[in-house]
Amino acid sequence: RGAVGHGAEHGPVSCATAVMIEETGQVVEVQGEFAWVEHERTSTCGSCSVRKGCGTSAIAKMLGQRRVRLRVLNQINAHVGDQVVVGIAEQGLLRGSLAVYAMPLLGLFAGALAGRFLGTSVFALQSDGLSIAGAVTGFVAALFWLRGFSRRKEQDASYQPVALRRHISTG
């Protein structure tokens, strides 16, 4: 398992085996084995050659740069005010994103198909009502599954952001 950090069920795990996505931020609070890290959300629009004619650039400019607060495993014993590099295992981020985006859609479509099948095969109806009811039921079922998935993965180290090292400013 290419996990990072540590969790109640896994103990300490090496970060060297996982491909990490990294971001720099500042520790604003420490709570036991966790630290709250803030970083400024930025877009890559500043380095793009077509930013003047792009809608995404205009939206990013309107929204401004917002600070994001993230709870991370504090393996490096960082203190309030420290600049740190935070990492999350790419595999965990991809799996989590897939669960959050794909499962509700899958539930929606599977429910709609099941409703359609029930309507035509079991009840001999050509109404879209059962398809709609099935879609809503499938979507809600997927949200309940997602809630359980989130609770199961809450302590899984491969899904946790981790403070990897202190950031040394070069400028």
Image (spheres, helix red, strand yellow):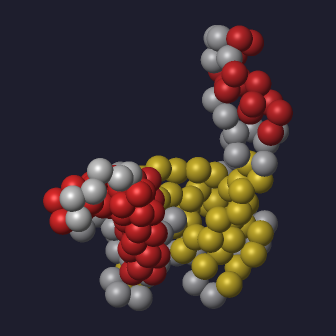
The answer to which of 153 and 87 lies nearer the viewer is 153
Q: Specify whether 23 is left or right of 121.
A: right
Q: Is residue 55 left or right of residue 120?
A: right
Is 159 displayed left or right of 38 in the figure? left
Note whether residue 159 is visible: no
x 47%, y 50%: residue: 21
Q: Whole-percent x and y of residue 119?
A: 27, 60
* Residue at image coords 67%, 26%: 56
Image position, residue 75 (x, y; %)? 52, 75
The quarter holding residue 142 reads: bottom left
* Image height of 122 relative to 77, above or below: above
Can residue 63 be seen from the camera position used here?
A: yes
Q: Quadrant of residue 47?
A: top right
- Residue at point 62%, 71% (across, down): 71
Please name whichever residue, 104 or 95, is drawn nearer the observer in this view of the structure.
Answer: 104
Please give the name of the residue rendered at 74% of the width and 48% of the height, measured from the top-left corner: 40
In the rendered image of this protein, does residue 156 appear above or below residue 56?
A: below
Q: Farthest left residue?
A: 121
- x and y percent of residue 76 in the render? 56, 72
Out of 164 and 50, give the one closest to the viewer.
50
Image quadrant in which the N terminus is located? bottom left
